[in-house]
Amino acid sequence: MLSYPSSAREQPLWAGAREGCPVPGMPHLLLIGADPTALDAWRVGLAQAGVPVAGVSSAMDAPLRLRSARPSMLVVIEPWDLDEAREAIARCRSAAESTLPVILVLWSSPWLHGPAPADLEPVAVLDASKATATDLIRAARLLAGTPAEIAIEVAGLGLDPVERRLRGPAGDAFLTPSEATLFGLLLARPLDVVRVEEVARALWGTPINGSHERAAIRTHLHTLRRKLTSVGAGEAIRSVPGVGYRLAEQPQERPSQAG
């Protein structure tokens, strides 16, 4: 299992990010939640990491807060009730007249281990007991469609997204743009099952429209696995039938960012 602090507030939430440096390509976030202490901790941590926070709001007041905050993404922090969270998201999207992307930071939910409800898409789910501001930054950039610019390393596997260089225990290999996008998505969310629909959106900016997209994803996955085998990590990706893909083994250390 990953070695994380038992609470996101036991260490600086910006751990792994460069303090005070603006993060390129970050959307403006509206933080929503029931616990003012948790909201303030995430607000401070994200601000220290150089991430623009458009505002902080309770679930009840969030639709009104949208008018002044004008966020491009919602972050729901540790809601007491998932149904209340879904309702708040629906009201915010209605008020914004836009399907704003959502990041859910949850303590306990089946959504942490499987797909979230389809009506919440586009959505990313983070575990509140493990996530830091760096994890939230990665999720937000992926949801916003911002190309990865920072090298990521997890469990001895690394990816330089600029050079598209895959690093493994037995050497390096170069990936195609689609392979790099797919593997970067998995590395950025080492605890998550990445749904097929999310892969399609990352690759082409559109949801799954038919069997040809699924076949194309399987082709990219096949060639990616061959290259992983060549660098000594042939079993790194696990298929989750009917859902998507995830990293096959949990690393022993926190994911780190270089650069």
Image (cartoon, rainbow, N blue to C red):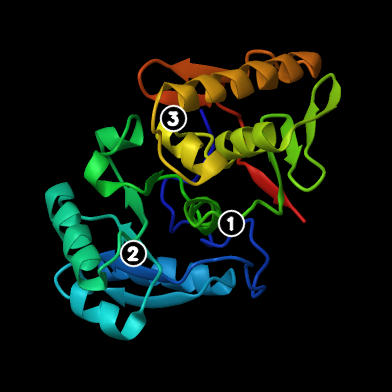
Of badges 1 and 2, the one in the foreground is 1
- Residue at image position (72%, 14%) is 226
State how far apart marks 2 and 3 are (Cα): 32 Å
Residue 229, which numbered label? none
The quarter of the displayed image where residue 32 is located: bottom left
The percent position of residue 68, horizontal first and vertical second, equals 31, 86
How crowded pointer 1 is (Cα within 10 Å; few <14, some 14-19, many 20+) is rated as some
- Residue at image position (27%, 48%) is 120
The number of numbered badges drawn on the structure is 3
The percent position of residue 173, horizontal first and vertical second, equals 83, 27
Kindly tell me whether residue 48 is visible in this rendering. Answer: yes
- Residue at image position (33%, 29%) is 114
Which residue reaches farthest right?
A: 171
Disc 3: which residue: 196
**Residue 69, above or below 189:** below
Q: Earlier in the sequence, mark 2 or mark 3?
A: 2
Residue 38, which numbered label? 2
Observer-nearest residue: 118 or 28? 118
Q: Residue type at mark 2?
A: Ala
Q: Is residue 131 left or right of residue 172?
A: left
**Residue 226, above or below 166:** above
Q: Residue type at mark 1?
A: Thr
